[in-house]
Amino acid sequence: MKFRRSERLVDMTYYLMNHPRELVSLTHFSTIYQSAKSSISEDLVIIKETFENRGIGTLQTVSGAAGGVKYIPKVNQKEAEEFIQHLCELIADPERLLPGGYLYMTDLLGDSQILNEVGKLMASAVSDLNIDVVMTVATKGIPIAQAVAHHLNVPFVIVRRDNKVTEGSTVSINYVSGSSKRIQMMSLSKRSLKEGSRVLIVDDFMKAGGTINGMVELLREFHATVAGIGVLVESEYQEERLVNDYISLAKLTNVDVKERKITVTKGNYFSDQVDFL
């Protein structure tokens, strides 16, 4: 079946956006659309320009016999700033206050549109770091890890606080919680992570950084490398944090239970070197 150019452009765009960071050969497209590689190359130039003009990504060209193109998701800075500002406003809603000064966040972590944007932002920040896998700890970090992994087109693994029979053999460590100073345990299935993997750690909330530091220690048991750390919300913390290099989208600076006021500001996302379009 011979495709018209307009059909090729739509179909190629759809394919590339659903296979981020995957190297796709010109031969692959040429065979599907029964078109010359020169025509495919012209189409890809149009798609690349459209991606960059819209601020939704770019195409990387890999030359050579085994070459092709990769779609790299990116973010437009203006849209990123608007989303993070909106996120801060949602978190600052006093109706989120729970007894003890805790915040209700389940609705945000269950909103597919918000998660998609969070995933895109975090993935864009590490798009040049050659991530092999995304890691998080059960349970609230799971939807964030899934969203980020989708935009990076890599698997994600879940660190658990207890052993499950369905996980098979596991590696377990004890770690000290940063804020409560309690010794806790976390484990990861041996089958879930290959030695030498480059790992992006993500979580929904960070205070002192004890849980994330525990995941860093756990990765050493797998001889894996921490390629980056991303959190949805970081909390103001007066003492020394156990984690220094990380990206946060929002920062919780104050929770006044008596006045029912939550103060949230933008995280350090824009102060780090994020590759914006």
Image (cartoon, rainbow, N blue to C red):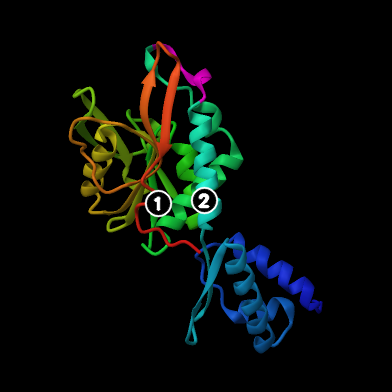
Q: Residue at x 47, y 61 (%)?
A: 276
Query: In the image, 228: left or right of 180?
Result: right
Q: Secondary structure at mark 1?
A: loop
* Mark 1 residue type: Phe
Q: Residue at x 53, y 31 (%)?
A: 90
Quarter residue 129 falls in? bottom left
Q: Are marks 1 and 2 in contact (CB under 8 Å)?
A: yes
Instruction: Tell me how far mark 1 sits from mark 2, CA to CA.
Output: 9 Å
Which numbered disc flags the more N-terminal residue, 1 or 2? Answer: 2
Q: Which residue is mark 1?
A: 270
Query: Is 235 rendered above or below residue 226?
Result: above
Q: Residue at x 24, y 33 (%)?
A: 210
Look at the image and say whether residue 148 sits in the magenta stretch.
no
* Mark 2 residue type: Ala
Residue sitting at the far front: 259
Q: Which mark is residue 80?
A: 2
- Residue 223 image position (x, y, % from top left): 22, 53
Q: Residues within 10 Å of mark 1 (few under 14, many from 20)?
A: some
- Residue 217 image position (x, y, % from top left): 21, 43
Query: Is 264 rendered above or below residue 147?
Result: above
Q: Residues within 10 Å of mark 2 (few under 14, many from 20)?
A: some
Query: In the image, 172: left or right of 259?
Result: left
Q: Name the image quarter holding the N terminus.
A: bottom right
Pick whichever, 192 or 89, lies toward us: 89
Pick whichever, 196 or 83, lies toward us: 83
Query: In the image, 172: left or right of 274?
Result: left
Quarter residue 45 falls in? bottom right
Look at the image and say whether residue 94 sits in the magenta stretch.
yes
Image: magenta residue range: 93-99
Q: Which mark is residue 128?
A: none
